[in-house]
Amino acid sequence: LSSKLPNVGTTIFTVMSKLATETGAINLSQGFPGFDCSPELVSLVEYYLRNGFNQYAPMTGVPALRESLAQKTFEQYNVAYDPDTEVTVTSGATEAIFAALTAVIRPGDEVLVFEPAYDSYVPAIELNGGVPIYVTLTPPDYAIDWQRVAEKITDKTRLVLVNTPHNPTGHVWTRNDLNQLADLIRDRDIWIVSDEVYEHILFDGRVHHSLMTHPELQERTFVVGSFGKTFHVTGWKIGYCLAPMELTTEFRKIHQYLTFSTVTPIQYALADYLKQPDHYRKLPDFYQRKRDLFLDGLRGSRFTFTPAEGSFFQTVSYAAITDEPDYDLAIRLTKEIGVASIPVSVFYNRKNDYQILRFCFAKDDAILQEAAERLSRL
Ligand code: PMP
Ligand code: GLN
């Protein structure tokens, strides 16, 4: 069989988590919480499991969850989405991203991708015949040079992929970034997929500027979210897409034949649990403490860093320690000192190596302290 994705191997998250398990290393590579979700949420799922909510959910998601999502979104961002025609529940953000890209991209269409980019984006673009056009962001601040973005927009540009807060760098868009993007795509047939799965995890008083909060952008944007990050349940794989009706209609045509619908009892449980904002309002403090604990542990070391602005990832530079390629170093640190990380070069098209590793700090405090201590020995 000739491969449709000849340049794609096994995702780095699987590679590094497997190595961490085999070697018994502390796993700060693949991003998932090292602690459990709330017992109350588990009880809610149990209730729906035991009470007969076990058959197919509606294709678009259970109505109660779509309504809870619309309500939460309105309270948070003051933007109204119609739960019947503009909110769709998906099997994780991954499915939502794939469905949104598939709804828009035709062969030959150009898609602007900011790199380093989350690893599911480019394969999804290419499987649809799209052509990724890269805007390269570099350490230490990964700021967007809008002049360079403007130069990359052509008559073939059909879509811009946005991710804020950003994985892997923790960079967060400002209101100015939204305005700049709006200026660039005005009067053009360009749509946006905005991956906002870390919408609740921002630090040092920053606020999340969802693309839906800019009216011109909102009209063209598929906003993608995930419950995995917000409720510490990455294994449940439930996400969603918020988009104006015209976009949602096309989105659902894809979603209905990718997965049709998503696990039923958990959707009911999330519909109830979403009505309690307490949990996600505490996330910024909860994760900022963990970020700072990890960084305090690294302060005496030769690693250098700028504290992450959002997400639960911290990137660090090891340029003062060794010249090794980041991939080799990530493997060596896993085997030799027992700390697994993600080499950031894998998120660049040309595997640009800026000597940066990504660490996930969604872990128990003692684990973070032990990891920082081991890293400081280098
Ligand atoms: N986008 C980004 C930026 C992510 O970090 C992740 C997963 N960690 C996803 C999408 C996928 O989310 P899900 O597990 O809900 O498919
Ligand atoms: N999003 C997670 C990360 O960045 C991994 C998700 C996955 O393993 N596909 O680490």
Image: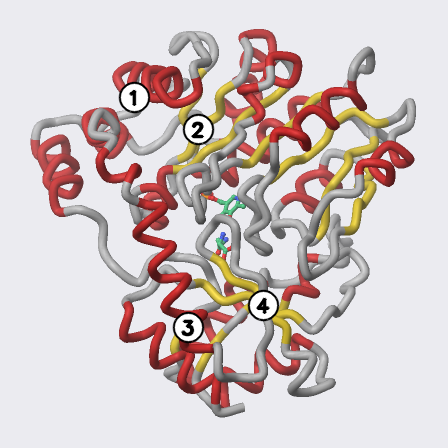
Sort mark 1 into few (<14), some (14-19) or many (20+) by Cα contacts within 10 Å.
many
Q: Label 1 is placed on what type of residue?
A: Leu
Q: According to the image, label 1 marks what residue?
A: 65
Chain-order first, disc 3 or disc 4: 3
Chain-order first, disc 4 or disc 2: 2
Residue 151 lies, in percent from the top left, at 91, 35
Q: According to the image, label 4 marks what residue?
A: 305
Q: Quadrant of residue 249?
A: top right
Chain-order first, disc 3 or disc 2: 2
Q: Residue at x 29, y 37 (%)?
A: 281
Q: Does residue 366 appear left or right of residue 89 in this picture?
A: left
Residue 240's disc number: 2
Q: Does residue 203 appear left or right of residue 236 in this picture?
A: right
Do the residues bearing badges 4 and 2 touch, measured as CB atoms within 8 Å? no
Sort mark 3 into few (<14), some (14-19) or many (20+) by Cα contacts within 10 Å.
few
Chain-order first, disc 1 or disc 2: 1
Q: Does residue 147 appear left or right of residue 54 in this picture?
A: right
Residue 296's disc number: 3
Residue 355 lies, in percent from the top left, at 69, 73
Q: Label 3 is placed on what type of residue?
A: Asp
Chain-order first, disc 3 or disc 1: 1
Q: Label 2 is placed on what type of residue?
A: Tyr
Where 54 sits versus 341, above or below?
above
Q: CA distance from mark 1 to mark 4?
A: 40 Å
Q: CA distance from mark 3 to mark 1?
A: 40 Å
Do the residues bearing badges 1 and 2 touch, measured as CB atoms within 8 Å? no
